[in-house]
Image (cartoon, rainbow, N blue to C red):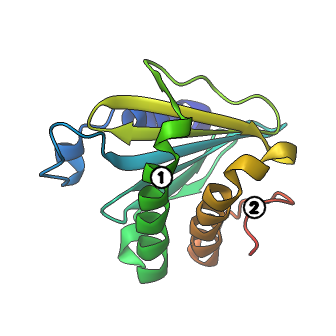
Amino acid sequence: MSEDKLWSAMRIAALSTNPKEVGIKNLPKKDISVFGVVMDIGYEEGTATLITYITGDASLYYSFGGGFVNGASKPEIKNAAIKLVSAAQEYLQKAEPVKEIPLPKLNEIIFSFLSNKGLFLLKANIEKVKELSELFKTANAVISAINIYSEVKLKHKYFGKE
C-alpha cells in the first residue's frame, strides 16, 4: 500500500471511530461529549494528520510518508493528547456539525471533533489562527511530544516547537 493510501485509510478510520472501538465507555447520552480530535494541516507536500483520543492515544501521519503511532505508551504524549481532547470540548460551540471532513487547503488547519453526537468541524488558516490559539497551542504540545520520539519530525514554522 502506498504512503498516501495508508495515510488516507488511517485518517478515514479515525474520523469514523466508534468510541467503544478505542476503549471509551460511558459517554453521556444527552450532552455532546468530545472523545477524539483529528487535526489536519495542509502543506505543499500533502497533509499531516494528528489523531488523539481522550484515552491518551495519539498518532501523527503524513500523506507524503511516515508517521508515529502508539503515543499513549509515552506519558508526555498521553497527557498532552488528553489535554487536547479536553480542550476541544470548550471549542464545541464554535464548531459546525458535519457529515464528512474535507482535506485542508495549503496552510489550512482543520480540527475535527469526534463526539457521541457525530463530527464537528473548525478550520482556520495557519496565519490567522488567533481565534483558535489555545487549541492550536494544545495541539502543538502533542506534536512537540511526538517529535521527541518520532524519526520523522513535523517541520513547519508553526508546529513542533513550544
From this view, report whether residue 12 is shown above or below residue 35. Answer: above
Asked whether the viewer can see residue 133, the reply is yes
Please name the residue shown 56% across and 37% down the image: 94
Nearer-the-camera pick, 138 or 101: 138
Please name the residue shown 15% across and 38% down the image: 29
Residue 152, quarter of picture: bottom right
Residue 105 in picture, x, y percent from top left: 76, 28
Q: Is residue 51 left or right of residue 35?
A: right
State the residue position of label 2: 159
Residue 132 is tagged as none
- The amino acid type of the residue labelled 1 equals Glu
Please name the residue shown 78% across and 51% down the image: 130
State the residue position of label 1: 90
Residue 30 in picture, x, y percent from top left: 18, 36
- The amino acid type of the residue labelled 2 equals Phe
Residue 7, quarter of picture: top right
Other residues around mark 1 within 10 Å, as few (<14) / some (14–19) / many (≥20): few
Residue 129 in picture, x, y percent from top left: 77, 48
From this view, report whether residue 18 is shown above or below residue 65. Answer: above
Asked whether the viewer can see residue 51, the reply is no
At mark 1, the secondary structure is helix
Q: Quadrant of the C terminus?
A: bottom right
Q: Is residue 30 left or right of residue 129?
A: left
Other residues around mark 2 within 10 Å, as few (<14) / some (14–19) / many (≥20): some
